[in-house]
Amino acid sequence: MAADREAAIVEINDWAVEQSLNDADMEPLFLGVCDRVAAAGIPICRVNIVVRTLHPMVGAVSFRWRRGAAPEHKNYRRSSEVSQEWEQSPLARLTERGRNELRISLEDADGDWKQHPLLVELRDAGVTEFVGRLTLFGSESKAREQLDGMLVSWATDRPGGFAEDEISALRRVQSRLAVGIKMANREETALNVVNAYLGVKAGRRVLDGQIQRGNGETLHAVIWYSDLRDSTPLAEKYAGVAYLDLLNRYYECTAGAVLDHGGEVLRFIGDAVLAIFQFEGPGANERAARTALAAAQEAERRLVRLNESRRNQGEEEVDFGVALHVGDMLFGNVGVPERIDFTVVGAAVNEAARLEGLTKTLGRRIVVSHAFSRLLLLDWESLGESALRGVETGLRVYAPPLTG
């Protein structure tokens, strides 16, 4: 029996390493290991894993395996405050006391499991022993400081809890599982970082190897350019963090609307937003234009709510302009070999920026070019032809029809 279990553990570890080399995601890797551990005869009834992530909004993820039940996945929002759930968790003891493992018998009527709501719940469900293990990613001092690693809890409902050889087997399995989790987490971290700083499509291009200066492709797409009005006096009035908060609220109106409508934000240029809506699939031109216009109108509605909130707080209102254009542009890497940027460049991009500059003089928050207006059969309001700085020929400008 011991030989059979030993062979099963070796097979599980080999499988985990193979999956790690095959770019397995964290969740299927974790669930696959749990299924195989249970099949090997180790009496687990519940396994939970928590891994910290580097993501603008998600601070950690957890996956849970339970015998005979559907797997569970939970994201924990990034926060500077420690949650009550974590403070009361038995796993917190591993980080606070500098330990790597704890074993708590839930069969002991006088045990300290009573101070942890989770363990009370598990004991009521029939769990007899709870084992928590911390595996660090990197040197101990640095990993503990950055909370870089994975926490795994193994639970059994067999009377008497886990046997010593079973605990030893779980330690070995967790070590192999940690290799795959670390690799998958690092790859996901890289994807999160490039997505957050470059945009989803540009980020994937970079990770796919388009990192050489000059790499790029020509795109024909809708161009969005928006800019915060009166930014200089606002920057003078709201210093430091207060101005950053104002910028972020403005970006939530503009860039947030772009993302919610399927556009891609390429750059934040000071207090300006450069984004594109690509032409993809049947009817792509009209669909891209319609979603871009819908995003601009949603940005206006968000601005109304933002200014209402600012008035209630005794703050002055803010405003911005949005220009929608369409044309060819080069989407690729520019810069110097040591520091490159993945963005769009070209005459159409410059025209969009100049077009946005007309929103204030024309008294309209949203303006579109003639090329854009031709993509949608709407009752456009002509604002005449305007000369754009740096553009040889004048550009016909339109405003969208008023919405109810």
Image (tube, rainbow, N blue to C red):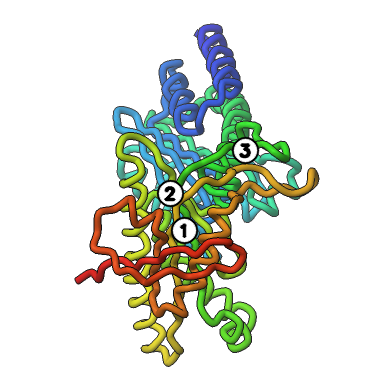
* Residue 151 image offset from top left, x and y in percent: 55, 42
Q: Indicate whether 294 appears above or below 194.
A: below
* Residue 273 image offset from top left, x and y in percent: 52, 62
Contact between marks 1 and 2 (CB within 8 A): the answer is yes
Between discs 2 and 3, the one toward the N terminus: 3
Contact between marks 2 and 3 (CB within 8 A): the answer is no
Q: Residue furthest bottom?
A: 314
- Residue drawn at x 47%, y 54% is 223
In screen coordinates, is 180 left or right of 251? right
* Residue 88 image offset from top left, x and y in percent: 47, 58
Q: Can you tell which mark lies on residue 224?
A: 1
| Depth check, front residue: 304 or 152 | 304
Q: Residue furthest front?
A: 393
Name the residue beneath numbered marker 3. Answer: 216
- Residue drawn at x 42%, y 54% is 259
Q: Indicate whether 372 appears above or below 3.
A: below
Name the residue beneath numbered marker 2. Answer: 277
Examine the rendering and report whether any part of residue 103 can be seen: no
| Depth check, front residue: 145 or 326 | 326
Q: Please name the amino acid that badge 2 sits on.
A: Phe
Alpha carbons under labels 1 and 3: distance apart: 20 Å
